[in-house]
Image (cartoon, rainbow, N blue to C red):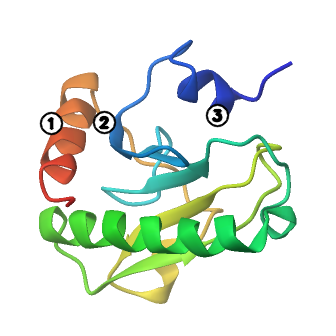
């Protein structure tokens, strides 16, 4: 069975997409730790990020850099943090999380809740700042 991320890539389930190219997709996390929390996912379904072919892994970081710059244009923060956990969904991905302190990247925190309209507006704003 395809992962939830593959289902998003195949448009079988909706997502708040902020960027996409032939190899990757980036969309807002629907259980965000911070406003603008975004997931970057390769389109190839590989469970463990360090099993990605080296060139693809390098490209993933460059793709994430452009997405992070877009997030930072929209969400006031000191930095965009990056985390790779890889236990919750068996599909390689990284988290881009706006940070104002190191504690903002604590996955034990209760996720924030936003309306569909707020997610849609945020995704559009971030998308408009990604080149």
In the picture, the quarter occupied by the C terminus is: bottom left
| Residue labelled with disc 3 | 5
Separation of disc 3 and disc 2 at Cα? 20 Å
Vertical order, 5 against 76 (above or below): above
Query: Label 1 near label 2: C-beta < 8 Å?
Result: no
Q: Earlier in the sequence, mark 2 or mark 1?
A: 2
| Residue 4 image position (x, y, % from top left) | 68, 28
Residue annotated with mark 1: 121
Classify 10 Å Cα crowding around label 3: few (below 14), some (14-19), many (20 and above).
Answer: many
- Provide the secondary structure element on which disc 2 rests: loop
Category of crowding for the residue at label 2, using alpha-carbon neighbours closer than 10 angstroms: few (below 14), some (14–19), many (at least 20): few
- Looking at the rendering, which quadrant does residue 63 occupy? bottom left
Q: CA distance from mark 2 to mark 1?
A: 11 Å
The residue that mark 2 highlights is: 114
Mark 2 against mark 1, which lies toward the viewer? 1
Residue drawn 78% across the image and 63% down it: 49
Q: Nearer the viewer, mark 3 or mark 2?
A: 3
Residue 89 falls left or right of residue 11: right
Q: Nearer the viewer, residue 98 or 111?
A: 98
């Amino acid at each position: 069975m395809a992962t939830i991320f593959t289902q998003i890539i195949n448009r079988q389930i909706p997502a708040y997409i902020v960027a996409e190219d032939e190899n990757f997709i980036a969309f807002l996390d629907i259980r965000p730790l911070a406003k603008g929390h975004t997931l970057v996912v390769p389109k190839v379904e590989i469970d463990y990020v360090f099993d990605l072919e080296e060139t693809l892994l390098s490209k993933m970081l460059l793709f994430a850099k452009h997405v992070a710059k877009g997030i930072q244009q929209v969400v006031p923060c000191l930095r965009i943090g990056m985390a790779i956990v890889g236990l919750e969904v068996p599909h390689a991905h990284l988290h881009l999380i706006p940070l104002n302190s190191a504690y903002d990247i604590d996955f034990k925190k209760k996720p924030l809740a936003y309306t569909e309209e707020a997610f849609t507006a945020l995704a559009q704003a971030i998308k408009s700042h990604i080149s």
